[in-house]
Every structure is written in C-alpha cells, then in structure tokens.
Image (spheres, rainbow, N blue to C red):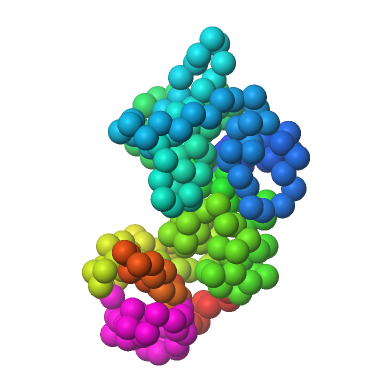
Amino acid sequence: MMTSLNEIHLSLDIVVNELLSLAGIDEPPVNAFHLAQHLGWEIVLNARQEERGRLKRIHDKPTIFLKPDDRPERVQWALAHELGESLSDRWSDWIEEEELTAGPASREALANLFATRLLLPECWFGNTVSQTGCDLFELKQSFSTASHHLIAQRLLDLADPLIVTIFDHGQRTSRRSNWLPSPPPVQSAELRCWQECHCHNKRHQDQADNLSLHGWPIHEPDWKREILLTRPLEMDDC
C-alpha cells in the first residue's frame, strides 16, 4: 500500500517534535546548528566542496561538511537536509520500503521535506500564519532561519486554497497551487499586483477579478525577487 503524503508528513513531524524537545527548542526560530551541536555532531565549513552539504563519519562520529554561503538561510537548509538524511532511520520504518528508492517518497525527497518541516515546524507554523494574517514579512521575523521562498512554499501545505508565484528579475520562475492539479495562467490582476511590488519595492495588496492578492518584494542589491500569493475570494479565510 502506498504511503500517503499526509502519512509522510505525520511521520516526519513526529521526528521533528522529538528533536525539538530533545534540544530544548520550544519556540521559533529553529537553528539547525544548535540542534546538530546538541546531538553531538561536528560541523565543518569547507568552501572547496561542490555540494552544499555532505555527511561523513570521522572516528565514528557524525561530521557534516557545509559549503559557506552569503545567505545564511541556505546554510541552515543544507544542514537541515543533511540531518534529515542521517536521521532517516527514525522515520523510514513508517514508509513502505519500495517507496524510499524513487518518487516523492525517495530518501532525497524526504530529506527535503524533513528540512522544510524542521525549519518550519508543524507545531508552530499554522498558528503563526493565523496570528500574522499570512504576512510573509512577519512570518520571516518569526522563522528567521528559513528563506522567504521556503516560507511561501510551506504555505501550500495548509488547508486554505492558495497559488504561490515567484518572479525573479522580472521573469516568472515558479507557480504552484495546493488545490488545482496545475495552476491557471497568471491573471491580469496578478500581473498588476506583481508590477506594483516589482517597480516600487513595497508590498501590495488587492482584490480584483474574484481574487485576493498579496505581493511582497524581496529585493537585494544583486537580486530582485517578488512573491505573490493568490486566493479565490470565496475561499479566502486566511
């Protein structure tokens, strides 16, 4: 029998909650370095390696080698991913063995899911979303070790119907939905909301064409990204 995505999430959340409790982390943000150190693992920064993170055992002690990055969220993600792979024995018993070698339940895919749900734990994320009114900037303040992009994609795990669209340097690079098999083309109202963020470097909110629209600019000196959240008005409960 195939393991459902909800069952996979539940299995990973159980492990995440155990780790948070073990490390005495009782509120966000989750610092993956603090967790790894609490587990007694060594962390080594290696600028010469190609991959973001890799795990080796040195003198029978887990050691994670990380590639430094100007964006600390990327290093947090890489470490959380390696923790997920190395701790796979804690959640693999709940997932069908044949699913661990390919597809959405492969060990690599599950390590990605684990990293997301470690940095944005289920036990806090949903309530914080409600408390902040889905404000991406406020969510980033609470979950500072996760990137804006990761937070926006994590919103798709919640029940409210949502489309998340990412624009980089004026080009759409990602568009995902949690209630449609494939998201529809970008609507005119969405483009107008995005353009306000892109051109004026400020958040923008609008309601048009039966859509609730929220856009946030994530602008840096060498990178210009906008994140657009789209909800159908008749189902907009967030």
Instruction: Report the residue at 32% width, 83% height from top.
Output: 199
Q: State yes or no: residue 187 in magenta.
A: yes
Instruction: Report the residue at 38% width, 67% height from top.
Output: 220
User: 215 and 62: which one is in front?
Assistant: 62
234 left or right of 166 in image: right
Picture quarter with the C terminus: bottom right
Q: Quadrant of residue 124?
A: bottom right
Counting from the top left corner in percent of width and height, residue 57 is at 49, 16
Counting from the top left corner in percent of width and height, residue 98 is at 40, 25
User: 53 and 192: which one is in front?
Assistant: 53
Residue reaching furthest bottom?
Answer: 208
Residue 108 drawn above or below residue 69: above
Q: Quadrant of residue 149?
A: bottom left
226 left or right of 140 in image: left
Q: Please report the bounds of the magenta region as a residue range.
A: 186-214
**Is residue 181 visible to us here?**
yes
Residue 227 drawn above or below residue 114: below
Instruction: Report the residue at 65% width, 63% height from top.
Output: 128
Counting from the top left corner in percent of width and height, residue 208 is at 40, 90
**Is residue 93 visible to us here?**
no
Counting from the top left corner in percent of width and height, residue 231 is at 45, 76
Instruction: Report the residue at 36% width, 62% height from top.
Output: 176
User: 58 and 124: which one is in front?
Assistant: 58
94 left or right of 25 in image: left
Q: State yes or no: residue 175 in magenta.
A: no
